[in-house]
Image (cartoon, helix red, strand yellow):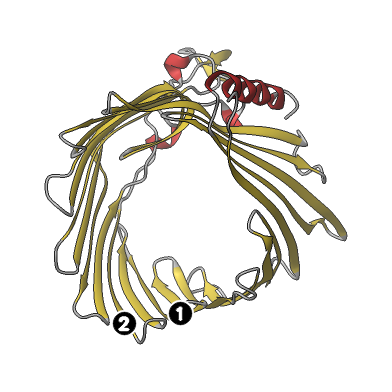
Amino acid sequence: MQRATPVIAVLLFALTGSVFSQRINGRFVTSMYAWQRDDTIGVQNTYVMGFQAVQFDLYQKDISFHTYLQGFSDFGSLTSSGQAVRLYNLYFKASNVGNVLDISLGRQPVYAGVGFGTIDGALSRLRFLGDKVVLVGYAGAVPPPYQKAAVIEHVDKNFMAGGQIIALPVDGGRIAVSYTNSRAEQPSYFAIRRDSLNNALGTFVTPEAYSNQFVGVDASYRLAIPVSVYGRYEYDVNYEHISRAQLFSRVSVTDQVAFTGEYIYRSPRIPFHSYFSIFPRNSVQEIEGGVEYNLSPTWRLFGRLARVSYTLDDNRRYTAGVSNDYGTLSYSGSVGFDGKLNSFSAQCYYPMFERAFIPTLGAEYAEYRLSWDTPVEHVFAGVIGATVRPMPAFSFDLQVQALDNRIVQHDVRFFARANYWFSERLNLFQ
C-alpha cells in the first residue's frame, strides 16, 4: 500500500493537470471482518481482517482514466504477510475515436465471450454499420499472483489474447463468436527421479506453461411476444472436445404465468499441461424446468425441477418459494448421487425513513447426508444487520453472522463496512 499510493497520486495529479479533467468519480470502502475459531483443543483465537478499497474515474471529453485497488491488513496473523495490496484496474481509455473506435491501455478487465479475466495490455472495440457489428480485440500479460502492482516476468509464458465479433442482425437478436488463447507459467522445482539404471538422481524440473484455448458462440433472441431464447457453445481447442453447451428459454403465457426451460452440458475446465489432465474427466448434463406465477404486482411464486446426470448416476434437484419486494421464503432439496439435502431459507429487509435505514434479517436450516449409509447432519445459519445511510454519499453496513452444526458449534462473526462515494465536475484553469 505504501508503494502503490504515491504512484496512484502521481498519475492522478498528472492526468488532472495535463488534460484538465472535467469530472471525477470516486469511491472509498472500508470494511472489517472478525471471528473466533478453535485452532486446537481448548485454544480459541480471535481474528480480525481489515480491507480498504479505493476507486477513481476521471473523464475529459472522450479521454478517461480508471483505477481500482484494494488493500488489506491482518490484525490476527492469519496470513504470513500480514498485509497486502491488490491492484485490479489501472488504465487509460480513449472513446469514440473517429466515431468508430474505443481503445484502452493498462490493467483492465476483459469480458469477451470465452475470454474473461484481467490483462496488463490493450483492448479495443471497433464498430461498423451503425454499431450493428462490433469487433473486439485484446492482448496482454496476465497480472502477477495476488494482483500485485507490477508487470509479470516472461510475458511470452504469461499472457492472454483473443477477440470477439458481435452482430445484431435483427431487432431483439444478438450473436457473437469469440476466441481466446492464454498461458500461465508454472514454477520450477527440484525433485528426485530414477534414471534408466534405477539410480536416484536429483533433477531440476521445469513444467510446461498451463495453456487454455477456446472457441465460443453465444446468441440470444427476444421475440415481439414475450419469448426469449439464449444459447451458448464453447469448444476446447487443446483437448478437442466440447467444454460447455447451454440453451435457455423463457415463455410468458399470460401476464401472470411464465415457464422456463434450460439444458446445460459441462466438462471440467482443466488447463492443458496440468497434472490433473492425466486423470479421467466426466461431463455433467443438467435439464431444468420451472414455472413463475405473479400473484400480484408485488408477490411472486416460483418452482423449479431439475435432473443432473453424471457418468454412472444422477441427481434430482427441486426448488419452490415465494418472494415480494421485501424478501424471499424458499425451500430447496436434492436427492441422488451426491446424497440428500433439505433446506429452508428466509431473507427479508424493510426500507425505513426514505431508505435511510434498512434492517435485514435472514435464516436457514438444512439437514443433509453425504451418502445413504451416513447419519443425517443438521446445520443452522442466521444473519442480522442493517444499512444506515445518513446522507446520499455515505452508508454504513453492519452484520452479525451465526453458524451452528456438529463440526462448528456457535460460530459467530461480525462484519462492518463504511462507504463514501462522490462525483464532481471540475472547472480547472478557466
Of 309 and 25, which appears nearest the observer?
25
Residue 388, percent from left and from top: 69, 65
Residue at numbered disc 1:
324
- Against 211, is 373 above or below? below
Residue 14, percent from left and from top: 61, 19
* Residue kind at label 2, given as amino acid type: Tyr
Of 244 and 27, which appears nearest the observer?
27
Residue 155, percent from left and from top: 46, 16
- Against 257, is 130 above or below? above
The image quadrant that residue 401 belongs to is bottom right
Residue at far left of view: 170
- Against 289, is 132 above or below? above
Q: Residue at x 72, y 30 (%)?
A: 1
Q: Residue at x 35, y 43 (%)?
A: 280
Report crowding for label 1: few under 14, some 14 to 19, many 20 or more residues within 10 A (C-alpha). some
Of 83 and 19, which appears nearest the observer?
19
Quarter of the picture containing the C terminus is top right
Of 22 and 308, which appears nearest the observer?
22
Residue at numbered disc 2:
293
* Residue kind at label 1, given as amino acid type: Asn
Residue at far front of view: 430
Mark 1: which secondary structure?
Answer: strand
